Image (tube, grey):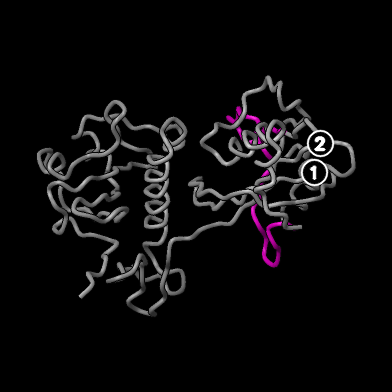
Amino acid sequence: MTEVAVYIVPDCNCQADDSFLLFHERQLLIRGNKFLWQKSELIAAGLTGFNGLLLEKGERNTLAAVLAADEAALLNGDLVATREMLLRTGEQNFNLIGQGTQLITWYQSHRFCGSCGVNTVPHPTQRALVCPSCDACYYPRINPCVIVLVTRGDQVLLARSSRPGAKFFSCLAGFMEIGETPEQTVAREVREEAGIEIENIRYVQSQSWPFPSQLMLGFFADYKSGDLNPDPEELSEADWFEVGNITVPVAPSLSVAGQLLEIYQQSLKKQPILSKAKTAY
């Protein structure tokens, strides 16, 4: 008989050698560069009684859990912003921490049924929360977004968000709307945010992006017409940059935006790389 995964694990069912990602108010508890805590460490500190959200199942499970302020203080670690930790870690750790923070956000925001208001309970075999009163079922939410590197020969369009604290220049991006294809979203977002028209939209790759829970669909597109006219509500600045001479801070290579830029830089030297992109519009 195949063992059925239980995705929300009661504290009493966790093993001493299980590992935990620990969160408090959407910050990650770390020690130096280490972000995983053994269950045995939590027991030694007197921490018991919380549920863990299963991230990786094996002989040693990896789970995510939320601590109250006094519980986090018992472990004598440091709380860091999840975004900061994600952008300074490697790809494997990025995926694990990203999954953890997305599931914690979902779990905390679905404690009550959106239909009747009753407290939800864990589904016995699925990664879901269910309402014991009206049987409504809530799965982790994923928001599809597009992100596009617009190119004009050896120039690329990069912009900085008007969001407070934004320091990196990146590709244009936006959420898909009801009834749109990803390609239609790409064209609309570029038109709305930068005031230009594009063509030859082609899919490149995707990435899970946990801010808070996006699936980023990455595209290339060619400039067609128009003058840049950035929307100040979305962008603080936008400009064309020579791809071999970008002097502004750009999105880190761990992000799909940074990867799109790297692929395009390489494609100008090795044309076959760009041909991997799928023409989609």
Q: Which residues are magenta?
A: 158-184
Residue for point 25% across, 70% down: 4
**Residue at image mark 2:** 152
Disc 2 to disc 1, how far (Cα)?
6 Å
| CB within 8 Å, label 2 to label 1 | yes
Quadrant housing residue 184: bottom right
User: Does the image show residue 162?
Assistant: no
Q: Which mark is residue 136?
A: none
Of residues 237 and 16, which is closer to you in this image?
Answer: 16
- 161 drawn magenta: yes
Q: Position of residue 205 (x, y in %)?
A: 59, 49
Residue 250 shown in magenta: no
Q: Residues within 10 Å of mark 2 (few under 14, many from 20)?
A: some
Residue 99 sits above or below residue 253 on the image? below
Q: Quadrant of residue 14?
A: bottom left
Which label's residue is closer to the chain start, 2 or 1?
2
- The answer to whether residue 188 is left or right of residue 103 is right
Residue at horizontal 77 percent and vertical 52 percent from the top: 187
Residue 265 in view (yes/no): yes
Residue 256: give x, y in percent of width and height.
Answer: 57, 41
Left or right: 224 in relation to 221 = right
Decide: is 28 above or below 49. above
Query: Where 84 falls versus 201 (above or below)?
Result: above
Within 10 angstroms of label 1, few (less than 14), some, or many (20 or more) residues? some
Please state which of residues 174 and 270 is positioned toward the viewer in this rendering.
Answer: 270
Question: 240 or 261, which lies in front?
Answer: 261
Disc 1, SS? strand
Residue corresponding to mark 1: 222
